[in-house]
Structure formats: C-alpha cells, structure tokens
Image (spheres, rainbow, N blue to C red):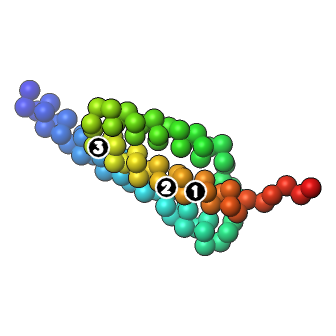
Amino acid sequence: MMVLENYAGVLAICATITGLAMAFSYFPEAYQMWKTKNVKGISPIFTVVLFFAATAWTLYGLSISNYPIIIPNAIALVGIILVNVLYFRYCEKPKK
C-alpha cells in the first residue's frame, strides 16, 4: 500500500504542474494578439467552449474544495477571458 500512496502523491504533483503549464499557455497567445493586433488563426468558438469548460472545472473544484483543480482552472479562465476579449477587440468587423 505504501507504494500506491507514493505513486498517487507523485501523480498528483505531476498533474498539478501539468495543469499550471496548460493554464499559463493562454498568456503568450494573448500577448502576441495584443502586440500584433492580429487574431487570424484564433477560433472564437474554441475559446468560448474553453471558457465554459474552465468555468465548470473551477466551480467543481470549489464545490469539493480541491485547490489543485481550482487554481489551474481559475488561472486558465483569466487567460481565456483575455484571449476572448482581445479576439473580439481586434477581429475584422464585417463590412456593411
């Protein structure tokens, strides 16, 4: 049993690090969008779906008081909101 407990602890640490890396991955994209004012290649549907997924995971983490779920998803939520705001700010408006 001791081996399984150690394995679960190592797995929890790896999952937390991976979650944080994924959470912070939105910020370089947002920076590039802000710097270049170019949002080509960004799918607004994809980012909106990610917003709802990160919101659901954050709420789930809050409901069970699980910080390894809450923290990465809350950080991702901020990054996703930033990407969405920048997308809708810099996307080309249809010509009338």
Left or right of residue 19: residue 5: left
Q: Amino acid at mark 3?
A: Pro
Percent from the top left, x then y, of residue 12? Answer: 24, 40
Which circle's residue, 2 or 3, is located before the other in the chain? 3
User: Can residue 39 be seen here?
Assistant: no
For disc 1, the marked residue is 83
Q: Position of residue 23 (x, y in %)?
A: 42, 52
Instruction: Please name whichever residue, 27 or 12, is drawn nearer the observer in this view of the structure.
Output: 27
The mark that comes first in sequence, 3 or 1, is: 3
Q: CA distance from mark 3 to mark 1?
A: 23 Å
Task: Tell me the distance, in whole angstroms, between the alpha carbons under discs 2 and 3.
Answer: 17 Å
Q: Which image quarter is the C terminus in? A: bottom right
Residue 77 in the figure: left or right of residue 96:
left
The amino acid pointed to by label 1 is Val
Spatial separation of the CA atoms under disc 2 and disc 1: 6 Å
Seen at 40% across and 48% down, the residue is 74
SS for dot 2 = helix
Q: Are marks 2 and 3 in contact (CB under 8 Å)?
A: no
Q: Which residue is mark 2?
A: 79
Relative to residue 60, is residue 54 depicted above or below?
below
